[in-house]
Image (tube, rainbow, N blue to C red):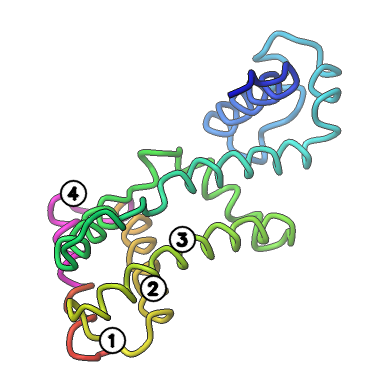
């Protein structure tokens, strides 16, 4: 594998500082000047690599999507037993906790931008489309081998993502002490309950 170019390395360094500034000061408080100050460089250096803050935002979002994409379901094709394969899928999806991968302040700030900026929304749509396709593949396999019984794999995948994302969001708002084991069990039980007996 070839070495990364100096430009690529420099851009990643700038984005890492941008990330830290967002954590400390929020998205609206982040500026090229503040990033440059933290890096102890002239702001013109940042402009050399990113023409403006919007370009830097897109670079950060591409980084976030790339990081999250690396946590999409792995290849389970070597697991020969259908029941075991489905249980492995549930283990992986129930363990997904985005805040262990990416700071929530950064993620939700970027996600919110997707509600008003088409180029940002497009990137999130592509990510969730990839996640959904990976889930559909496993749902179809489990369905064909009688592990689950559903009518609509696409709808089932969307429900799984909704459950995972909702759980990730709500765990930070629950007034009680977070219980990860309880959360994992809830996700597995809910999915299995929904996916047996052609409920979907």
Q: Earlier in the sequence, mark 2 or mark 4?
A: 2
The residues bearing labels 3 and 2 have C-alpha atoms spaced at a distance of: 9 Å
Residue matched to label 1: 150
- Lateral position of residue 198 relative to residue 46, left or right: left
The residues bearing labels 2 and 1 have C-alpha atoms spaced at a distance of: 11 Å
Measured along the vertical axis of the image, is residue 14 above or below residue 169? above
The N terminus - image quarter: top right
Residue 112 image offset from top left, x and y in percent: 60, 56
Residue matched to label 3: 131
> In front: mark 3 or mark 4?
3
Residue matched to label 2: 157
The residues bearing labels 1 and 3 have C-alpha atoms spaced at a distance of: 19 Å
- Lateral position of residue 115 relative to residue 79, left or right: right
Measured along the vertical axis of the image, is residue 92 above or below residue 43? below
Q: Secondary structure at mark 1?
A: loop
Q: Earlier in the sequence, mark 1 or mark 4?
A: 1
Q: Which residues are magenta?
A: 172-190
- Say which of 180 and 150 sits in front: 150
The residues bearing labels 2 and 4 have C-alpha atoms spaced at a distance of: 22 Å
Q: Residue at the spot x=65%, y=58% of the render?
A: 114
Residue matched to label 4: 180
Q: Secondary structure at mark 4?
A: helix
Crowd class of label 3 (few under 14; some 14 to 19; many from 20; radius 10 Å): some
Q: Residue at the spot x=21%, y=61% of the render?
A: 85
> In front: mark 1 or mark 4?
1
Q: Earlier in the sequence, mark 3 or mark 4?
A: 3
């Amino acid at each position: 594998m070839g070495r990364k170019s100096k430009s690529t390395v420099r851009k990643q360094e700038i984005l890492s500082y941008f990330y830290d500034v967002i954590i400390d000061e929020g998205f609206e408080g982040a500026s090229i000047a503040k990033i440059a100050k933290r890096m102890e460089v002239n702001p013109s250096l940042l402009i050399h690599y990113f023409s403006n803050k919007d370009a830097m935002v897109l670079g950060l979002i591409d980084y976030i999507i790339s990081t999250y994409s690396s946590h999409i379901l792995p290849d389970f094709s070597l697991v020969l037993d259908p029941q075991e394969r489905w249980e492995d899928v549930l283990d992986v999806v129930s363990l997904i906790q985005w805040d262990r991968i990416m700071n929530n302040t950064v993620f939700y700030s970027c996600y919110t931008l997707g509600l008003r900026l088409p180029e940002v929304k497009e990137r999130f749509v592509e990510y969730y489309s990839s996640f959904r396709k990976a889930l559909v593949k496993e749902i179809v396999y489990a369905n064909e081998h009688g592990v689950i019984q559903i009518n609509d794999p696409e709808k089932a995948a969307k429900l799984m993502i909704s459950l995972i994302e909702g759980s990730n969001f709500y765990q930070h708002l629950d007034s009680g002490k977070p219980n990860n084991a309880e959360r994992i069990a809830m996700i597995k039980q809910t999915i299995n309950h929904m996916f047996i007996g052609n409920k979907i």
